[in-house]
Every structure is written in C-alpha cells, then in structure tokens.
Image: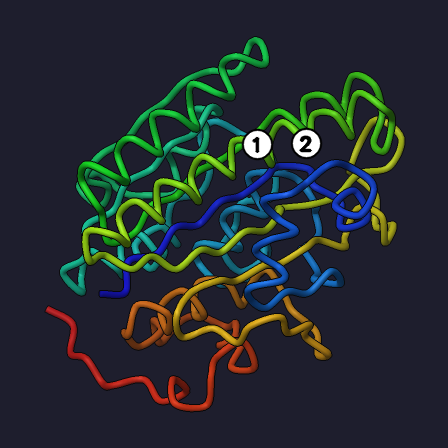
Amino acid sequence: MNNTILVLIDGLRSDAITQAHTPAMDCLMASGTFCLAGQTVEPSLTLPAHFSLFTSLPPYSHGVLANTGLPDMSAAGQSLFAHLKACGKSCSAFYSWEHLRNLALPGNVDYSHLQKICMENDLEMIGGAAARHITARRPDFTFVYLEWADVTGHIHGWMSDPYLDAVSRCDHVLGKIVEAAKTADKKGICFNLVVLSDHGGRGQHHNTGHPDVLTIPFIAYGKPVRKGHRLAGPVSILDIAPTIAKLMDIQPHPEWQGRVISDIFLPCSRKVPMMRLG
C-alpha cells in the first residue's frame, strides 16, 4: 500500500526545529529524508502558499495572491486532491482555517473535519480526530493542517519562547499522527509521511521576502524513502504535489510545474509506473 499523510505546520521555521523540543520531527528526520533549506513562494501568505503546494504552480499562475475567502478557483481542478480522486484515491482533510476548503472542488475530499483554533486544546482535538480517522478508515491520502505555531508567532513573535512552545505542541500532535500510522502498519497498511511548512516568520509577521520567512523545512518518511538522508539540493513547495504523487505510485499532473524530489527515494523506488486517468 502507498497511503500518504501530509502534515503542514503553519509558520514553522526550519531553525525552530533545532531550538524547540521536537522529538517526533527529530525521529522522522533520523529515519527518513529531510531538508531544512526548502523554499516557499511569494507572496509568502498562507492561502497562496497552500495553493502553490497543492497545484504545483507559483501564485501568479494559479491566481491566489491573498488570504481571501473567495480565491480564484481556476487551478483547483488540477490540485493534488482532484488529481488523486481522478486516480481513484480516497482523500481526507483536517484543518482549522476555513479558507483551506477552497483547496478542493466539491466531491474531491471524501471526509473533511474543520475545527477552529481558539486555544491549545483545539490543536489536540484536531490531531486526535485525524489520528482516529487514520487508524479506523485508513484513507489513501490525508491532509492535516496545524495552525498553532503561526497563531502564536503573530501574537508573541517568531522564535519567542511562546512560539517555540507552540512548535513543541504541534510536534506533540504530529507524534499522535505518527503513532496512528504505526498502528495502521500493524494491520498491514503502510503509510508515508510528509511534513513541511507553508512559510516561516520574522518579528510578528511573514509578509517580507526575508530568508527567515521564505525558508521552510521538508521531511519525508516511508518504506520507499531513504533513511537518515539530508538533501543537498534545493526543495521548493511546488515540488510537494509531484513528490506525493510519486509516493503514491501515480504520474504527476501534466500542468504541474514542480518536480519530483527524486533524491528522497531508495534506488529501487525511483521509477513511477504509468497510470491513465479516468
């Protein structure tokens, strides 16, 4: 099986992983492949970055340039959700920011869970719901969005003590999801995990082109993924959708502009079988 979980920690700076208590991410990096010098897009805002992640297009190509509740949906038909559904895969999503519903056209997500973040316990509730769903339903693709680090960064500042504590809390929730994947593995379902951020931050915002904002972490873990490997080459947020497609043994969408991050894969896993859509 090639089930895959994508966990996005909003506002996670790469250097926060080395300064906060992050045992789940540390374990995934030691057991998988990672890059702490990945790059997001400009404008470095949450919705444009997410559209770039899911459509593998830069913002001026997919047309989402702001955190608006009514974005241009013209690129959503070639999003990762739509592409996976066209290939017969089941998709689930767990998130706390309602605008992210626009990442998928109606019918492309089989199960959706929205829980707004008002306090730290809400973060735990999202993670718990995702973990239970993964264990019980074992969807082909699961997207989990963790917002608390970004919320705290805007209030207290990136790299502040409260921000680093928020990163640790997100890591704790990630650990629950990892444990759910391990439980499913005991039942014969092997999950791949991809963990990354949409942007970093500087001061109390992330609307500049500074490296602290544009640099993001990327972690991949799974049976076809190289173990304990640090990527030497560049990683773009546009590369995530093609790489997840490769992890799930399907061809990338022909309109995607990103590339498969082939260096994460073990040598025997580098060929992708052709698959017809529809």
Q: Which residue is drawn at 37% across and 32% down?
A: 94
The residue where tag 1 is placed is 172
User: Residue 205: where, in percent of width, then height?
Assistant: 80, 31
- Residue type indicated by callout 1: His
The quadrant the C terminus occupies is bottom left
Question: In terms of image quadrants, where is residue 148?
Answer: top right
Which class describes the residues within 10 Å of circle 1: few (<14), some (14-19), or many (20+)? Answer: many
Give SS at disc 2: helix
Along the line of sight, which residue is nearer the eye, 134 or 82? 134
Question: In terms of image quadrants, where is residue 73?
Answer: top left
Q: Height in image: 112 above or below 246?
A: above
- Residue type indicated by callout 2: Ser
Q: Which mark is residue 168?
A: 2
In the picture as drawn, the residue positioned furthest to the front comes out as: 186
Which class describes the residues within 10 Å of circle 2: few (<14), some (14-19), or many (20+)? Answer: many
- In 3D space, how far apart are the residues under numbered discs 1 and 2 (Cα atoms)? 6 Å
Asked whether the beta carbons under mark 1 and mark 2 sit within 8 Å of each other, the answer is yes
Q: Residue at x 42, y 39 (%)?
A: 177
User: Residue 219: where, in percent of width, then height?
Assistant: 58, 59
Q: Which mark is residue 228?
A: none
Q: State left or right for residue 167 relative to residue 102.
A: right
